[in-house]
Structures are given as structure tokens and as C-alpha cells.
Image: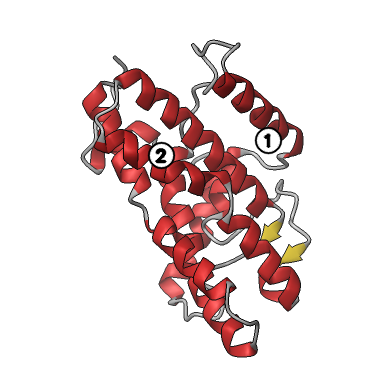
Amino acid sequence: MSCTELRGLLQTLVSETIFASRERLLVLLSEQGSSKNRERLEAEFREFFCGYENLALWLEEYEEDPLAGLDVDTVVAKRLKRHREYIFANRKTTLEERMVRRMGSYLKSDPMPKKKIAELGQDEYRALLHGLANQELFILQPRVNRLLTEKAPHEELLVAFREFFVAYELLELVLEDYHYDPDEGLELRPEVAERLDQSVAEVESGTAELIPFEEVAKKLGIALNCS
């Protein structure tokens, strides 16, 4: 990516709704737990999860090794190496399985998560949201914003993007152990349900036309040609 393209992508990522939603979650989590508070938490977590899905649209097709080209003796490279080793050791799903999960369904090959977020007790639910809201992704976001504001060199932005991507993978890994459908309890039109079922069937049969990361970026106005 050229410097301009990378800046555009990072600006899009750090502006996603998940970051504003995380701040609102922290406020709600600081309040005393109650049935009304649970309802508000559930409504805000729906927004948080949809923000995660938006990030996934940008990042799920990124296939480059975030460690490639980094000096292995640097603090950043060592930290990212530890994180990726942890991710690979604990990840249970394939990319296709995670993509279908985000459509509210599961492939037959997917190891179904045993826990449903909607059925968690109050203490476990709040603990999960605390953990998600304090993921490394949210520590990195203001730092990336600062680098963009200060017009940091291309090399620094590339490292920041790699850190951001790995932090996104860590957030995704936490969610992997839970079943969550943000549309649960909401009305789903029959034609939408039919289309979702068809999409899952196409992925399972191998006939689905998955949109590459580069094409998504192009449609949204950001070119991602390698430089």
C-alpha cells in the first residue's frame, strides 16, 4: 500500500463504531448491575458486536503475515509473535466458518460454541463485557489516531496496522467461544432469512463468490495496491 492508501485504511478502521460503543459500554459497566442495566448493556453490546462485524469486513481477507519484514529482535515483533502463537494455538475455526458465523449461522464443520451470550448469568455477562472492552485493540486505537494526526512516516503506520490487525484477531478469539446473534429477538423478514440460508448453502458447497479484501476496499473508495 502507498502511504496515502494506508492512511485512508487506518482512518477508516479507527473511526468504526465499535470504539464509540466501547466507551458507552464502560459507562454502563461502571453502574450498579440491575435488570434495567442488563437491558441497556444488551442493547449496547449489540452495537459493539455490529462494530466488530464492520471491522471484520475490512480485515477478514487480510492474509499477509503481520510479522513479515519486521526485525525479529524488536519489542513489537516479539509481542506480535507471542500473540500470534497464542491465537493459532487456541483458534478453533476457519476463516469461512467465522464469516458464516457473522451471518448468524454455522457451517456443518464448525465446532459450535457451548456458551450463549444471551444465557449468561449477570456476573459472567458483565465479566465478558469487561474483558472485551479492555482488549488491546482499544489501547491501540488512540495511538493510531495520534500517528495519523502527526503524519507519522509510512514505516510507523505499517507497524501500527500490523499491531491493529493482531489485536483484532485477539478480540475475535474471545468471541469465538460464544454463540451470539445480534438479530436474536428482532424481527427477520422471510426473504432475508431465505437469502441468509442460501448464502450459507453456497459457502458449504464451494459455489459462493467471496469478495476479496481488495474489492471491498475498492467499493468503499480505498485502493489497496501493493507498492
Type of amino acid at the residue the image marks with label 2: Arg
Q: Is residue 5 left or right of residue 82?
A: left
In the image, is residue 223 above or below residue 191?
Answer: above
Q: Residue at x 78, y 61 (%)?
A: 114
For disc 2, the neighbor class at 10 Å (few under 14, some 14 to 19, many from 20) is few
Q: Where's the N terminus, which quadrant?
A: top left
Rendered residue at 27%/32% (across/down): 7
Q: Residue at x 29, y 21 (%)?
A: 153
88 left or right of 197 in image: right
Residue 128 badge: none
Q: Is residue 78 above or below residue 61?
A: above
Query: Compared with residue 92, is residue 124 higher up or lower down, i.e. above or below?
Result: below
Q: Which is more toward the observer, 185 or 2?
A: 2
Q: Secondary structure at mark 1?
A: helix
In the rendered image, the quadrant that contains the C terminus is top left
Image x and y of residue 128, in percent: 67, 62
From mark 1 to mark 2, how far is it between C-alphas?
A: 23 Å
Q: Can you name the residue that lies furthest to the right here? A: 114
| Near-viewer residue (179 or 148) | 148
Residue linked to disc 2? 143
Counting from the top left corner in percent of width and height, residue 120 is at 73, 73
Q: Which residue is mark 1?
A: 87
| Colour mapping used in the image | secondary structure
Q: Residues within 10 Å of mark 1 (few under 14, many from 20)?
A: some
Rendered residue at 36%/27% (across/down): 157
How many numbered marks are there?
2
Q: Amino acid at mark 1?
A: Ile
